[in-house]
Image: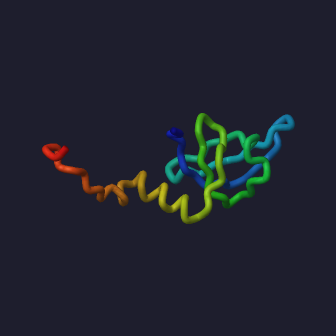
Amino acid sequence: MCLGSIGRLERVWDEGGIAMGMVDYGTRMEPACLMYVPDVQPGADVLVHMDFVLEVLDPERAADARALRSGELLDISLPDAGQG
């Protein structure tokens, strides 16, 4: 399970032969390594873990992930504890 963050890639650059990018998380911007997704382009929604972009998310999946993390999708019916 990945407990990464969802952000939008704002720009990319080369740092000593390693692809790097600036990721906007909405409340902050931080650099991340792009070595696992070298073809990612600015404007893409990305999943970042430990300062590495691990996955490029399609718009629908990124929207779902943001909604889940904001609590919008937490309307989950749990079974009654007394039922087996």
Count the marks: how many? 0
Q: Is 57 placed above or below 38 here?
A: below
Instruction: Between residue 71 and residue 76, name the one nearer to us.
Output: 76
Q: Is residue 84 left or right of residue 1?
A: left
Residue at (55% x, 50% y) in the render: 6
Q: Is 58 placed above or below 31 here?
A: below
Instruction: Between residue 31 and residue 74, name the one nearer to us.
Output: 74
Instruction: Between residue 78 and residue 62, name the one nearer to us.
Output: 78
Instruction: Between residue 81 and residue 8, name the one nearer to us.
Output: 81
Q: Is 30 placed above or below 9 here?
A: above
Residue at (29% x, 59% y) in the render: 75
How is this picture coloured? rainbow
Q: Which percent across, then down, holds residue 74?
A: 33, 55
Q: Which quadrant of the figure contains the C terminus?
A: top left
Q: Which percent across, then down, holds residue 65?
A: 49, 55
Q: Is residue 14 left or right of residue 47?
A: right
Q: Which percent across, then down, holds residue 76?
A: 29, 56
Q: Which percent across, then down, holds residue 78?
A: 25, 51
- The extreme left residue here reads 82
Residue at (35% x, 54% y) in the render: 71
- The extreme right residue here reads 17
Q: Is residue 54 left or right of residue 6?
A: right
Residue at (78% x, 47% y) in the render: 38
- The extreme front residue here reads 84
